[in-house]
């Protein structure tokens, strides 16, 4: 009698009444009915082929068994394992776990072979198969998750990297040149040696899966018959052929290229597919022509339809950034002025009196003493610093105990910071100057706590800040800038002098922009302009924004600032509304066409349209729609992925407002670019069934399998579990109440953003 072999390691199984146990790896298997020795022999052969990782051949062998013995459960199970490329790998604990070499494009539980296994398996074996399937499905989902951030590609190149001796093939050398040729033409190309070499880790299969599923064309290159039939090469092109056969890829998108071999040596699966001979004199021109016809020029797969006509953008030219208008900070050195006059005995006595008066809090008397010295000796640094302390009503004791209630620090209106500069300049040594600078920084840090009217507080503070940063190292200066703005954040925005103080602080803090960096300067100053706009202070905002436009008159953010100031609005959404009221739709478009960074303008307009007032949108539907379509028509200049994403959003937005005809326009456009886009297909389903939201499909118990778009959707390359689960619930009521609530709250269009805004 033919012995049964283990599906994991290939060893013989031992009969244990209700189950089989592998005598080598101890894996247990549920018993199933095997009709004869012939069936077992065929299964053993197919299992051996699968365990050799020849999954396509194994799949064919299991298929032959199914044809001959249509009720053989193990044949369906083996074919399913082959379809998924399952190899059982021994762990350090001597337990065999499934490893997936051939990701599929659908959930294992939706596979027809799995359904046949459940149907044919004996009742006590069903749970065993379910557990194995769950284990495999978890691995499949884990691997797919690895590729979430793996960008879609245009062309997949399949070839044999190493020969039977492990040496690099000449095929590898040619496809490298081909990779660089196609890359230069603007296509995103997948070549395993190059692309996978940029990915950390060893789980390459999910990336191969992602590349095959997103590729718009596959090139299969070979110089020998055995290379094209090699296990892993065959694994790649056979999966791509499956996508062609299910209508997910164009037939002409598989491009065989050969050299030094007879084209008739290609596998029979390639029948009817025209190959390219590398030795052809016009090989490169022919290849580029085929790729362009299949994908589009330079990888751009945008197709103009009856709904949208792509709007071309001209590069902004003839503009120059005027850096001369950017203020700069003059750095100074401590103790820079070394010409000092020797102090007399009389001056020394007067200086001593001045500091004694300071200690006794007799600040006016101290001021007189220090001024007397300075009239006679303009280089006495101690007198300058003493007079500065006296003018603030503080002394050395204050610096040692900053919270002492004996002091009442103040800002006199005639405070002269020249005393600080001269003290720092005339200090005879750098260490003495550094001591004065450290004391000044300490004073600055605590000025925020002084009870002084804001009418002139921040003018004084900003002037002091400007002097200090001219002496400080860059890192210390930036730290002081943070202190400056942290304090200002506590000021009441309704303060009468809020705007004046805001501008005063900005004028000095902007001096710290690195080496007059234009971009940083514009970003920092534009923040102030936006704050002024929020406060409806359009006059001041205009003055400041005009200064920026003189530096860069094609900056997207500055153009938006200008538009909001002109129309006296304070947000992008209200700008859209004002544009419609004022009938300035063409002017809005110039924010895109005039900008050096038009993509930023497009995104801001679309983002504003997402949160626009729903009632306003419904009243002004035609005009708002016109703006949506105008902005969308520019997106293909930058990214088809972003274009599709926005089409889906606005399709759902219109759908949720019961505008079915308008909604269909957006979904159809998305499907022109990606015929298997699950979100667009789902949108079409909701339109056909007049369901505004997903929960409505459940409530109406729509028989989804009777809708063509649903059958296309569940066979798409993306994860479709959410949609199949909805169908499952409609038929068998499997969702919990919390799951239904989640679906009830799932909004995809305007309402999601609008509700968040008003929540």
Image (tube, grey):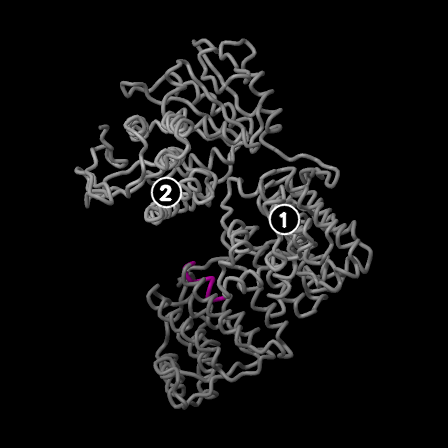
Q: Residue at x 58, y 42 (%)?
A: 711
Q: Which residue is mark 2?
A: 121
Q: Residue at x 46, y 63 (%)?
A: 469
Considering depth in this image, is 596 or 56 the residue closer to the camera? 56
- Confirm whether the magenta stretch covers residue 451: no
Q: Is residue 197 left or right of residue 293?
A: left
Magenta-colored segment: predominant secondary structure = helix
Q: Is residue 558 left or right of residue 440?
A: right
Q: Is residue 704 left or right of residue 483?
A: right
Secondary element type, mark 1: helix
Mark nearer the N terminus (1 vs 2): 2
How packed mark 2 is, by other alpha carbons closer than 10 Å (few <14, some 14-19, many 20 or more), is many
Magenta residues span 467-474
Q: Quadrant of the N terminus?
A: top left
On residue 575, the disc is none
The reply to whether the C-beta atoms of the residues labelled 1 and 2 are less than 8 Å apart is: no
- Establish if 641 lies above or below 457: above
The quadrant holding residue 140 is top left
Secondary element type, mark 2: loop
Q: Is residue 543 visible?
A: yes
Q: Which residue is mark 1?
A: 648
Considering depth in this image, is 149 or 731 the residue closer to the camera? 731
Q: Is residue 552 visible?
A: no
- Establish if 311 lies above or below 732: above
Q: Nearer the viewer, mark 1 or mark 2?
A: 2
- Establish if 280 lies above or below 104: above
Q: Position of residue 324 (x, y in %)?
A: 61, 50
């Amino acid at each position: 009698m033919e012995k049964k072999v283990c599906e994991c390691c290939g060893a013989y199984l031992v009969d244990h009444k209700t189950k089989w146990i592998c005598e080598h790896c101890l894996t247990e298997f549920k018993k199933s009915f095997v009709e004869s020795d012939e069936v077992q022999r065929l299964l053993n052969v197919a299992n051996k082929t699968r365990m050799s990782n020849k999954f396509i051949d194994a799949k064919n062998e299991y298929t032959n068994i199914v044809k001959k013995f249509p009720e053989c459960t193990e044949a369906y199970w083996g074919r399913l394992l082959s379809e998924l490329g399952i190899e059982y790998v021994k762990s350090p604990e001597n337990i065999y776990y499934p490893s997936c070499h051939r990701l599929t494009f659908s959930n294992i539980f939706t596979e027809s072979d799995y359904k046949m296994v459940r149907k044919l398996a004996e009742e006590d074996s069903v749970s065993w198969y379910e557990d194995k399937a769950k284990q495999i499905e978890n691995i499949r989902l884990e691997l797919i998750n690895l590729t979430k951030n793996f960008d879609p590609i245009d062309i997949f190149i399949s070839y044999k990297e190493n020969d039977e001796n492990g040496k690099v093939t000449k095929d590898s050398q040619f496809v490298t040149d081909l990779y660089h040729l196609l890359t230069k033409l603007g296509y995103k190309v997948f070549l395993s040696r190059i692309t996978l070499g940029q990915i950390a880790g060893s789980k390459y299969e999910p990336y191969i899966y992602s590349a095959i599923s997103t590729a718009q064309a596959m090139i299969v290159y070979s110089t020998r018959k055995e290379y094209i039939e090699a296990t892993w090469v065959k694994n790649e092109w056979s999966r791509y052929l499956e996508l062609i056969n299910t209508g997910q890829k164009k037939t002409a998108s598989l491009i065989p290229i050969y050299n030094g071999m007879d084209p008739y040596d290609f596998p029979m699966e390639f029948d009817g597919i025209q190959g390219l001979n590398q030795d052809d004199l016009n090989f490169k021109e022919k290849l580029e022509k085929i790729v362009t016809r299949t994908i589009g020029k330079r990888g751009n797969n945008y197709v103009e339809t009856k709904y949208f006509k792509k709007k071309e953008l001209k590069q902004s030219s003839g503009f120059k950034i005027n850096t001369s208008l950017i203020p700069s900070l003059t750095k100074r050195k401590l103790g820079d002025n070394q010409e000092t006059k020797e102090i007399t005995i009389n001056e020394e006595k007067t200086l001593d009196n001045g500091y004694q008066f300071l200690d006794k809090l007799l600040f006016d008397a101290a001021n007189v003493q220090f001024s007397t010295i300075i009239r006679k000796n303009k280089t006495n640094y101690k007198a300058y610093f003493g007079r500065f302390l006296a003018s603030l009503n503080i002394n050395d004791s204050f610096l040692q105990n900053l919270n002492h209630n004996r002091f009442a620090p103040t800002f006199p209106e005639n405070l002269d910071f020249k005393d600080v500069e001269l003290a720092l300049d005339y200090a005879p040594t750098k260490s003495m100057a550094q001591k004065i600078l450290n004391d000044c920084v300490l004073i600055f840090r605590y000025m925020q706590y002084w009870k002084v009217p804001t009418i002139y507080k921040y003018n004084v503070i900003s002037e002091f800040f400007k002097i200090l940063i001219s002496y400080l190292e860059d890192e210390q200066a930036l730290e002081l800038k943070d202190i400056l703005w942290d304090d200002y954040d506590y000021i009441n925005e309704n303060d009468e002098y809020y705007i004046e103080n805001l501008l005063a602080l900005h004028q000095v803090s902007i001096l710290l922009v690195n080496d007059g960096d234009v971009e940083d300067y514009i970003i920092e100053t534009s923040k102030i302009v936006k704050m002024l706009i929020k406060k409806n202070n359009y006059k001041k905002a205009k003055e400041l924004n005009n200064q920026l436009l003189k530096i860069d008159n094609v900056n997207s953010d500055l153009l938006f600032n200008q538009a909001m100031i002109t129309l006296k609005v304070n947000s992008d959404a209200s700008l859209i509304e004002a544009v419609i009221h004022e009938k300035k739709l063409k002017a809005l478009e110039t924010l895109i066409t005039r900008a050096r960074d038009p993509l930023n303008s497009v995104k801001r307009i679309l983002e504003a349209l997402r949160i626009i007032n729903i009632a306003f949108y419904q009243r002004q539907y035609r005009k708002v729609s016109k703006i949506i379509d105008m902005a969308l028509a520019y997106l293909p200049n930058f990214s088809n992925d972003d274009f599709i994403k926005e089409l889906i959003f606005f399709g759902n937005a219109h759908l949720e407002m019961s505008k079915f005809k308008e909604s269909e326009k957006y979904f159809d456009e998305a499907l022109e670019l990606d015929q298997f886009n699950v979100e667009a297909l789902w949108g079409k389903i909701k339109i056909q069934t007049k369901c505004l939201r997903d929960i409505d499909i459940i409530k109406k118990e729509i028989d989804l399998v009777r809708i063509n778009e649903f059958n296309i959707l569940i066979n798409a390359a993306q994860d479709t579990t959410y949609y199949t689960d909805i169908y499952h619930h409609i038929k068998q009521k499997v969702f919990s109440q919390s799951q239904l609530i989640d679906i009830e709250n799932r909004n995809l269009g305007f309402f999601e953003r609008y509700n968040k805004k008003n929540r």
